[in-house]
Amino acid sequence: MALQNIFIEIAVAIRAALGFWAYPPLSAVVVLLVSIIISLTSNLVNRHFIDYDRLKRSREEINKYNAMKKQVKEEADPRARRKLELKIKRRERYIMKLQGEVSKQSFVPMLVTIIPFMLVFTIMNGVFVDPGLAFPPNAIPAPVLWSPLNFGQLLGPFGLGFGWQYGQWVDTGPYAPGVPFMGMGLLYIYWYIICSFTMNMIIQKLLGTTMTSAYG
């Protein structure tokens, strides 16, 4: 409970410091900057911990091993099949070691980054809330960006939860008056996903940390 109060105090302080930047459309810029920082941090951590060339070679060895296991099932010649089985048996321990290294290189960066990122999202969840309502657990998230498109109507059942319509919000404080059922307000988490997906691709290309280079 004390930890929750600390997060609440931090979120309230950040929201007060942001001022109008905590409300749309400026709040969308803040979330964009957060997504850039998180994507950049994540890729720098990956670049430090992951040897992409070695990971690529390991994946190639594992793929060859799996191809041999598939081939032995399709081999009709008993002598050829026996040779493949012996070759697979000899490489089994080595491949298991490679698989462990691949899992470790994937797990360590996630372990290093997931806790800070969870803290960031916890705080953001308290920053972008409706100003007319009390703070959590009574407050509800507020949109950070108004879109001219109504994704709920365009996507049908797949658009549920993507955002909130103008008509579902009371026009208070910095919120501009809206027309009910026209347009869609994107919550910070959905806008963050859009920004993060885009920025992560760009940063991966710049830093050479794309996993396609590691998996071949």
Image: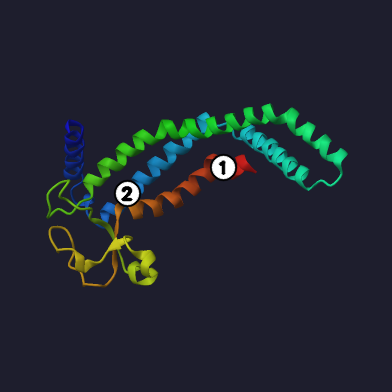
Which x, y percent locates residue 45? Answer: 47, 33
Amino acid at circle 1: Met
Asked which secondary structure carries label 1, the reply is: helix
Q: Decide which of 91, 54 is in the foreground and name it.
A: 91
> Relative to residue 171, is residue 78 depicted above or below?
above
The image quadrant that residue 38 belongs to is top left
Which x, y percent locates residue 168? Answer: 20, 65
Picture disc at residue 211: 1
Q: Is residue 148 left or right of residue 93?
A: left
Q: Decide which of 25, 216 is in the foreground and name it.
A: 216
Q: Quadrant of the C terminus?
A: top right
Figure label count = 2
For this orientation, the residue located farthest to the front is: 78
> Relative to residue 101, is residue 159 depicted above or below?
below
Mark nearest the camera among 1 and 2 is 1
Amino acid at circle 2: Val
Which x, y percent locates residue 35? Answer: 37, 46
Task: Write down the residue under mark 2.
Answer: 31
